[in-house]
Image (tube, grey):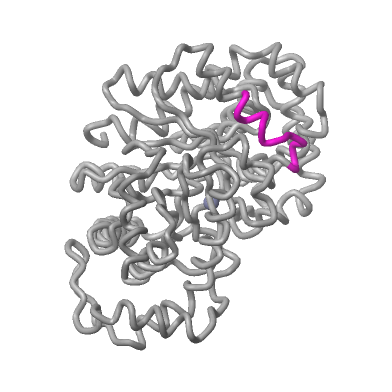
Amino acid sequence: MADKNDRHNNFKNIEMRLEKYSFGMGDRFMHQGRAQLQAVINAKEAGVNITPVWNKSDREHVIVGTEPLSLREEADAAVAALGWTGPYRVDADHINMGTVDRFVGCSDFFTIDVGDAIGERAPDADISAFVNRHSRYVGELEIPGAGSFPVTRDTIAQVAATFLKAVQTAGGIYRHIVEQRGMDFIPEVSMDETANPQTPLELFFILAMIADEGIPAQTIAPKFTGRFNKGVDYVGDVAQFEKEFNDDLAAIAYAISEFGLPDNLKLSVHSGSDKFSIYPAIRDALRRTGAGVHIKTAGTTWLEELIGLAEAGGEGLVIAKEVYAQALEHMDALCQPYATVIDIDAGQLPGAAEVNGWTSEQYASALRHDRSNPAYNLHLRQLLHVGYKVAAKMGERYYSALREFESDVARNVTENLWERHIKPLFIDREDS
Ligand SMILES: [Zn+2]
């Protein structure tokens, strides 16, 4: 067991440590870094320390035509411009072995996505070895805070049959990154892009596998129950989500003590933007347990750009309308890469001619995620969410509008992250 103890030792000497609260922010067009950071500064002034993490996936880089280094440069520039002295990170979001290399030099947070390998079977010998190594959990396994679960050798073998190969894949990617840059980075293992939510018992054994693989994971992204569609509110059973979230916190806390994983290991909530109806449950759970969390948001900032451009009027409003018309025309192609994380009812989408007749206020009201506004249209919002490729194709015309109307856009970007995300998650004492 010397090997295993060495690994535990490594977990205690992690070189880069992620703080208790961290907030992932995506910025497809690289102009909102300062406006995003301002929301985190507002939190600091309200007494809550949040580490900003700029995240961008390979898919987003490819669609927009940017290189990973540009995100590092944007983060550094925003931090310098606003005089931010706290920690900040740059996340290679949803990387795998095929895409990781161009992120290695410029990221210090790696979201290792092994969703595709879930359900692939590891070699039988590896599955038996895993069962033997963890056979002390056979019987009634009590996870403090989550209840007790009957466990047989077969239970453990089944979890291993579903997840061991995925965790072995994560281990391979983790070691590939270490070989190139050493251990000064934050590894996350993400399993959110898969069909079924993991149970707390599965999460416990997945964490055993992560420890066995020697991955000093600091965040883990499970799949939760319900729909986490892009840019819109949670769809599902909020009470069930709350139970699952609390049980996952309990499973993580127990796994830290059982397997010696980093003691700051915490949940990462993907597609975390705009999930307003579950924020009270998350906030209450964090407050009750003292646990930390990473909330990952991405496309919500791009939608605020459109709102800001629409509100600016003139060429800004023209561009916002053109993006909609083009997105409507190319809806199928734009939706295809995001098919599992959007639910658009085409019958609820206004026609391009109607939108072309809208005022700034009408456009902003339809798009802005204000549940109390009857004009808010979540179908239009989801379509525009996946429509950023249209703006990418506009190229310099779009970028020059971002510069020209910077103050309108920045105001919306900051207010969205601060008022609608950070405040209800981390600041507010009570829901009104
Ligand atoms: Zn994700």
- Which quarter shows the C terminus? top left
Give the side of residue 3 with respect to residue 324, left or right.
left
* Front-most of residues 211 and 398: 211
Residue 154: image quadrant is bottom left
Q: Is residue 70 magenta?
A: yes
The image shows residue 22 at horizontal and vertical percentages of 39, 36
The image shows residue 293 at horizontal and vertical percentages of 35, 44
Per the rendered image, the range of residues in magenta is: 62-73
Is residue 375 visible from the viewing direction of this image?
no
Give the side of residue 110 with respect to residue 140, left or right.
right
Residue 135: image quadrant is bottom left
Q: Is residue 118 magenta?
A: no
The image shows residue 245 at horizontal and vertical percentages of 32, 56
Which residue is most to the front?
Answer: 2
* Front-most of residues 284 and 315: 284
Please give the name of the residue rendered at 32% of the width and 27% of the height, measured from the top-left corner.
49
Examine the rendered structure and indicate whether residue 138 appears above or below residue 202. Answer: below
Is residue 96 visible from the viewing direction of this image?
yes
Number of numbered discs overlaid on the protein picture: 0
